[in-house]
């Protein structure tokens, strides 16, 4: 049987690129692509979850209940679910540059439109459209990075990109608090209206920047020599031809591992959606007052999560182990969310528990996305990654609504947090029990060189 490393070594030699030249190519691609992609996702994340800060004033202004907010926050993921696979298949056909530019500009326009919501149904409609427009961005980037980096480097690369989750929380909280605390009444608009407007404008500018600066493939990068670009492409193409990797999207949909990945991801995302949409409310519920104070405190869990995410991704690549890293992170998330619910009346302890939850939730993401890439390639990777992400992100609809319903029925978030903790526990158990992912570094994580 032809081994991945044998094919890769042959193709790399054929391109006449040395190990040092390849390493320099990967270094340049990391420095050129990752900061820009992180910036784009920060904008997407802020525009997706700033409704969590807007609700602190928006609900009373518009006479919306907590359940209305929870449904509106979550319906985003229905639009996301319906359009994610088509978007990723289109990216595979027309390239990342056009696809990501279209996504970025449209989500910016939709986010700004939320400033002019007057009714529940308008709120639902625009949040749904925001999901439609953003659909494909995250799985598109995950797929895009497979065009540049081999599997042995992807957990670290994924973790660097996914720090955008945490950085968005670090930046988004104080920024939203500042806008909410200072812009109320300016030009006759409420503070939450200014929040949507001011945080939507940068996305329009960023969309134009995507068209100008983002290369589709290594061969399109002016900052790589043709020899190095060809060698980088040969490495990832050799991996795609490796025995055991599924290349057909239809065949991938018949692979039970794809659907198990989707279920695991659903459970992981439930925690992420909860801390994204409910952290400001949870901090307010434990007794903190004032938009600016809430905004800065909301950054604390995400700072800790950023550190945990980068460390976990790098450690997973260094050791070649995937399942335990993902499972342990999910179990930590479950414990943190359950403890937050139990300690909701104790301010300091509840914030510590919420921080523990964020550490586990965010650390699980980069390692998880290394798992499906061990058995998917080509069109199968494009479609299946999007399918996993879209199905998993339905938790973004379920979890916020469960927590909102808990608030409406009981006056506290605790019961909703217990339910989400159960999802995270299930994620950890499913990853631990998934015996078909063998920790074989030679087969699954062959070195890039």
Image (tube, helix red, strand yellow):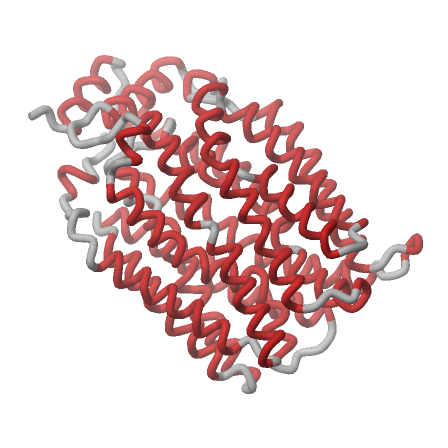
| Residue at the (17%, 28%) spot, across then down | 4
Residue 230 placement, left or right of 374? right
Q: Residue 437: percent from the left, percent from the top?
A: 19, 47
Residue 162 in view here: yes
Q: Residue 34: percent from the left, percent from the top?
A: 48, 38
| Residue at the (42%, 44%) spot, across then down | 389
Q: Residue furthest left?
A: 1
| Residue at the (30%, 32%) spot, across then down | 150
- 130, above or below 344, in the image: above
Hey, which quadrant is residue 407 in on the image? bottom right
- 318, above or below 137, in the image: below
Hey, which quadrant is residue 100 in on the image? top right
* Viewer-nearest residue: 207 or 111: 111
* Viewer-nearest residue: 148 or 249: 249
Q: Residue 321: percent from the left, percent from the top?
A: 22, 51
Q: Quadrant of the N terminus?
A: top left
Residue 313 placement, left or right of 95? left
| Residue at the (61%, 59%) spot, across then down | 71
Residue 349 placement, left or right of 50? left
Residue 184 placement, left or right of 336? right
Q: Residue 369: percent from the left, percent from the top?
A: 35, 45
């Amino acid at each position: 049987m032809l081994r991945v490393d044998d094919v890769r070594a042959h193709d790399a030699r054929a391109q006449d690129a040395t190990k040092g030249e390849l390493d320099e190519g990967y270094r340049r691609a990391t420095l050129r692509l990752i900061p820009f992609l992180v910036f784009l996702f920060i904008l997407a994340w802020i525009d997706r979850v700033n409704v969590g800060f807007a609700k602190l004033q928006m609900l009373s202004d518009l006479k919306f209940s907590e359940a209305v907010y929870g449904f509106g926050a979550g319906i985003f993921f229905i639009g996301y679910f319906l359009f994610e696979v088509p978007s990723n298949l289109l990216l595979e056909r027309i390239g990342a540059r056009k696809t990501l530019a279209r996504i970025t500009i449209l989500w910016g326009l939709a986010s700004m439109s939320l400033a002019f919501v007057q009714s529940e149904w308008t709120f639902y409609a625009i949040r749904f459209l925001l999901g439609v427009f953003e659909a494909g961005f995250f799985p598109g980037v995950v797929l895009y990075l497979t065009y540049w980096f081999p599997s042995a480097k992807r957990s670290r690369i994924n973790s660097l990109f996914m720090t955008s989750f945490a950085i968005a929380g670090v930046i988004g909280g104080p920024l939203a608090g500042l806008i909410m605390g200072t812009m109320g009444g300016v030009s006759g608009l409420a503070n939450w209206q200014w929040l949507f407007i001011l945080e939507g404008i940068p996305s329009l500018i960023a969309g134009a920047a995507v068209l100008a600066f983002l290369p589709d493939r290594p061969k399109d990068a002016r900052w790589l020599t043709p020899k190095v670009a060809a060698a980088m492409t040969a490495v990832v193409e050799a991996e795609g031809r490796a025995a055991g990797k599924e290349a057909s999207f239809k065949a991938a949909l018949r692979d039970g591992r794809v659907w198990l990945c989707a279920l695991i991801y659903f459970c992981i995302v439930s925690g992420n959606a909860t801390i994204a949409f409910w952290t400001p409310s949870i901090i307010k519920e434990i007794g903190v007052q004032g938009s600016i104070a809430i905004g800065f405190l909301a950054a604390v869990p995400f700072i800790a999560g950023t550190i945990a995410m980068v460390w976990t991704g790098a450690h997973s690549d260094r050791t070649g182990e995937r399942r335990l890293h993902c499972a342990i992170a999910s179990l930590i998330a479950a414990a943190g969310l359950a403890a937050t619910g139990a300690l909701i009346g104790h301010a300091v302890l509840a914030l510590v528990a919420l921080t523990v939850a964020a550490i586990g939730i965010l650390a699980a993401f980069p390692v998880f996305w290394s798992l499906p890439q061990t058995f998917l390639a080509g069109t199968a990777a494009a479609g299946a990654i999007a399918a996993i992400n879209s199905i998993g992100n339905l938790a973004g609809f379920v979890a916020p609504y469960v927590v909102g319903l808990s608030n409406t029925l009981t006056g506290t978030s605790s019961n909703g947090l217990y339910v989400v903790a159960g999802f995270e526990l299930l994620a950890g158990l499913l990853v631990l029990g998934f015996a078909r992912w063998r920790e074989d570094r030679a087969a699954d994580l062959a070195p890039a060189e």
